[in-house]
Amino acid sequence: MKIYTKTGDLGETGLFRGPRVRKDHDRVEAYGGVDELNAVIGHARAQELPTDIDRILLRVQSELFDLGAELASPAGDRAASGIQEAQIEQLEADIDRAEAQLTPLTQFILPAGSRGATVVHMARAVCRRAERGVVHLANLPGESVSPLALAYLNRLSDLLFVLARWVTHHEGAGETVWISSKQRDHLP
């Protein structure tokens, strides 16, 4: 089977078990954002991360494929399984387990640190963008998105933030604290 079909050469693509739409369709944009997030998480996994974090991110990548399949289905046709409540609960358990190893935040931190930590921070930012795209789709007339999909992306961005902190902690590096402009004005 050839990887190229030439069916998208004029700017259209097919939805899962559905009609052909323009490649700039809001639904394509939504699942494209999830695909981009999955790729950034793959990049994060290519860094030297603790085994526990890599295992979590591998599971998340598979779950993002589930979400992408759901989003690639036409409104009202949920042939793909999509996100389940248990997956959101697992993200929450992962967050709780990681946070138990971290000192509570008392200040804002910058997305900085080691290569691994910064790539996980980048994944969090891409997750927020993907979430905005899915929220946009969900609010369009005639479109629908599972509330579980929205909750999953919201929780995932929280997890990615905590995992970036966990990587920094695991490496024994300190977090870079944000210094407000008012405070910076008083620095030597």
Image (cartoon, helix red, strand yellow):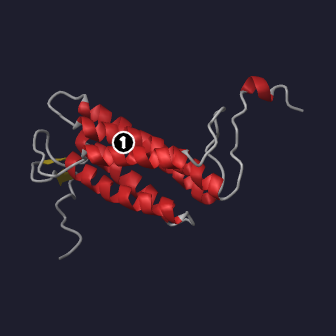
Residue 163 on image: x %, y %: 52, 50
What residue type is disc 1 on? Answer: Leu
Camera-side residue of 127 and 23:
127
Q: Quadrant of the C terminus?
A: top right
Asked whether, in this view, residue 56 is left or right of residue 72, the answer is right
On screen, residue 3 above or below 98: below
Q: How many marks?
A: 1
Residue on which disc 1 sits: 153
On screen, residue 11 above or below 158: below
Q: Residue reaching furthest right?
A: 188
Answer whether residue 78 is visible to the viewer in this image.
Answer: yes
Image quarter for residue 185? top right
For image coordinates 68% across by 45% down, the residue present is: 175
Asked whether, in this view, residue 13 is left or right of residue 162, the answer is left
Asked whether, in this view, residue 27 is left or right of residue 62, the answer is left
Residue 61 on image: x %, y %: 36, 58
Answer whether residue 33 is visible to the viewer in this image.
Answer: no
Residue 187 on image: x %, y %: 85, 31
For image coordinates 55% across by 46% down, the residue present is: 100
Residue 26 on image: x %, y %: 26, 39
Q: Residues within 10 Å of mark 1 (few under 14, many from 20)?
A: many
For image coordinates 64% across by 34% down, the residue present is: 108
On screen, residue 183 above or below 126: above
For image coordinates 24% across by 48% down, the residue present is: 23
Camera-side residue of 29 and 112:
112
